[in-house]
Image: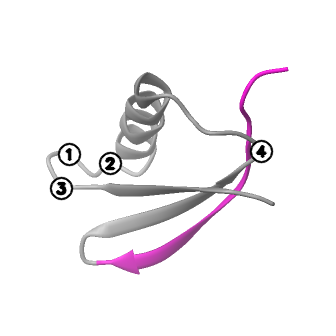
Amino acid sequence: MGARVLYATQGATDPPTFTLFTNRELSPGYLRYLERSIREAFDLGATPVKLRARRRG
């Protein structure tokens, strides 16, 4: 079973910061994919987006 994002919250707006709660450590490639997906879904353009991944204990 691979790494999964269990849920996410937005903790800040300047810059948009999202905390992802996961079951395992996420690979850098998957984090880039998630950042791109968030950027496209919310039409953020060139706005910097910060992702934090927290492993759920």
Q: Which residue is mark 1?
A: 45
What are the residue bounds of the magenta stretch? 1-13
The amino acid beneath tag 3 is Thr
Verify CB contact (< 8 Å) between mark 4 and mark 2.
no
Verify CB contact (< 8 Å) between mark 1 and mark 3.
yes
- Which of marks 2 and 4 precedes in the sequence? 4
Q: Residue furthest right?
A: 1
15 relative to 22, above or below: below
41 relative to 9, above or below: above
In this rendering, would 11 be left or right of 2?
left
In this rendering, would 41 be left or right of 2?
left
For numbered disc 1, what is the local secondary structure? loop
Verify CB contact (< 8 Å) between mark 1 and mark 2.
yes
Verify CB contact (< 8 Å) between mark 4 and mark 1.
no
Q: CA distance from mark 1 to mark 2?
A: 6 Å
Q: CA distance from mark 4 to mark 2?
A: 28 Å
Q: Nearer the viewer, mark 3 or mark 2?
A: 3
The amino acid beneath tag 1 is Gly
Q: Nearer the viewer, mark 3 or mark 4?
A: 4
Residue 43 shows which numbered tag?
2
Residue 9 x %, y %: 60, 68
Q: CA distance from mark 3 to mark 4?
A: 28 Å
User: Does the segment drawn in magenta span residue 4?
Assistant: yes
Q: CA distance from mark 1 to mark 3?
A: 6 Å
- Which of marks 1 and 4 precedes in the sequence? 4
Q: Which residue is mark 4?
A: 23
Q: Which residue is mark 3?
A: 47
Callout 2 crowding tier (Cα within 10 Å): few <14, some 14–19, many ≥20? few
